[in-house]
Amino acid sequence: MSPIPATAGIGLRFQHHRAVAETRPSVGWLEVHTENYMGGGLPPDFLERIRRDYPLSMHGVGLSLGSADGLDDGHLDRVAAAISRFEPGLVSEHLSWSVAEGAYLADLLPLPLTEEALSTVCANVVRFQDRTGRRVLVENPSSYLRFAHSTIPEWEFIAAIAKRTGCGILCDVNNIFVSSSNHGWDPLVYLDALDPGTVGEIHLAGHSLKTLSTGAVIRIDDHGSPIIPEVWDLYVEAIARLGQVPTLIERDNNVPALEDLVAEADHAAQILTRAIPHDALDAHAA
Amino acid sequence: MPTLREVQAAVAQGMLTRDHSEAAPYVLEDAAIPPIERLGIYRNTFVGTLVQALRNTYPAVERLVGGEFFEGASALFVGRHPPHGAYLNDYGGEFGDFLADFAPAASLAYLPDVARLEWALSCAANAADAPSLAAEALTALGDVDQGRIRFRAHPSVRLVRLAYDADVIRQAVVRRDEESFKGFTPDPQPFWVLAHRAGLEVVMRRINEADAAVSEAMFAGRQLQDIFTPEGMEAQVAVLADHLANGRFTSFEVAPPA
């Protein structure tokens, strides 16, 4: 297993398999969606070869850590098998749910932020970690609604998961920006609530604006455009608090040329070099 | 206060039916955006993600009917057949049968079989990796009663019964050579296609009815003595040899005597 360095990496998508193999871009590491490499054939064969040259992170999108029904045994087995096969340096999932009533709802759905939901997520995280033998990083979501009966601020909710289960946090700076904008939160309050010792990875991505029937505008986390300046500014704030944390450039839609992603990774890497090393930050906090 | 299970059941109901009335009361209200519209954002992603998954599996079907038609049919399919798990390579196997009953596509008699073929090829492409059985392994058997041998098929092997020249049509579409079948009348006569992954590439070919029956029995793990017949022995052994030579088995065992 190659550890993920505290520099910038990019999300590896099928469209870039050939370009990555041929050009070997100068990025610190690669991240893939776990679900894309669970079967056999061409994609996993490619990943077997490319992971010899790049540290690899595996990011799941379908485990549904927030499901009241618990984790799907079959899917958990597939995730565990993929982790065992590819030995990624980091393993991550989402603070969300996507399975209910026997159906997979193919989105990262928001949770009511209650004590009951907190207990459910913690139980599922513990089960995941016990089954895989790995510490999971849980990513904060972008959200477009809040439940009326929520009682815990999201930043306290995710910090509590890390504290109770020993898992880490994947801090998605774009998601903090999107949710803060949609719900009127202060993104710096969010960042301040995260214990730097628990944050193992940062995500950066683009998002879009959607005008609804009422004329209201909402931000949608579609990973389909370049990172906007406000998110870069928030990233500077994040690493000032969290130190040098491995940072991923994510792009899932309107996937641009590989060079464009590498350019964004270079920009993130430059910002990272100005940050305090994570270890020093931990020592300072201690 | 609703339980987490109650909230998730209500939201799921809206995602599957487009009726968010059960979940809307749980959503925090504000003047700017009604709860139903907020819930609708998630439903759009749900449908869009799964339509894209179907698009990835059924590129020839999409090309035959056009993007808009495909999107409309797929969105209906998603509502009737939501996935049961997050591994989306396993999603959409019923699409061929759905298209067979989909009235707006009734004039394209070959369309369901093109879909069934694409599903078989997708399954073959994504099946688990497994080493193939070397034919020489059988020569070490010695005097054992070979009639009691039964094989385990490679996970990528697919045998599918089609009609309307679905393989010819798919091939032309994939090659973007639709001109080649302009004026072409697909033959409604059924035929069989055998597909498997050779190395990393999926290969397929037509086989006849008799060979398909023998192959199906072998892939199902039946003993050779229950498959071979005196009158068809020569052809049946040839089918077995072809499967062994092309790596369509992963292992074998000798069943105990009855």
Image: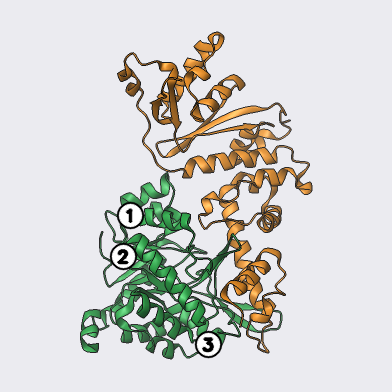
Mark 3 belongs to chain: A
SS of the residue under disc 1: helix
Residue at (50% x, 40% y) in the render: B124
Quarter in which the N terminus of chain B is drawn: bottom right
Residue under circle 3?
Answer: A151
Residue A32 higher or lower than B127, as above or below = below
Would you say A74 lies left or right of A82 here? right
> Crowding near pointer 1: few (<14 within 10 Å), some, many (20+)?
few
Query: Which numbered mark, 3 or 2, is in the foreground of this view?
Result: 3
**Residue B216: percent from left, percent from top:** 55, 27
* Label placed on residue A27: 2
Using the image as rendered, state which of residue B180 and residue B150 is in the foreground: B150
Colour used to depict chain A in the structure image: green
Residue under circle 1?
Answer: A84
Gap between marks 3 and 1 measured at Cα? 38 Å
Query: Which numbered mark, 2 or 1, is in the foreground of this view?
Result: 1
Of pointers 3 and 2, the one earlier in the residue sequence: 2
Chain in orange colour = B
Of pointers 2 and 1, the one earlier in the residue sequence: 2
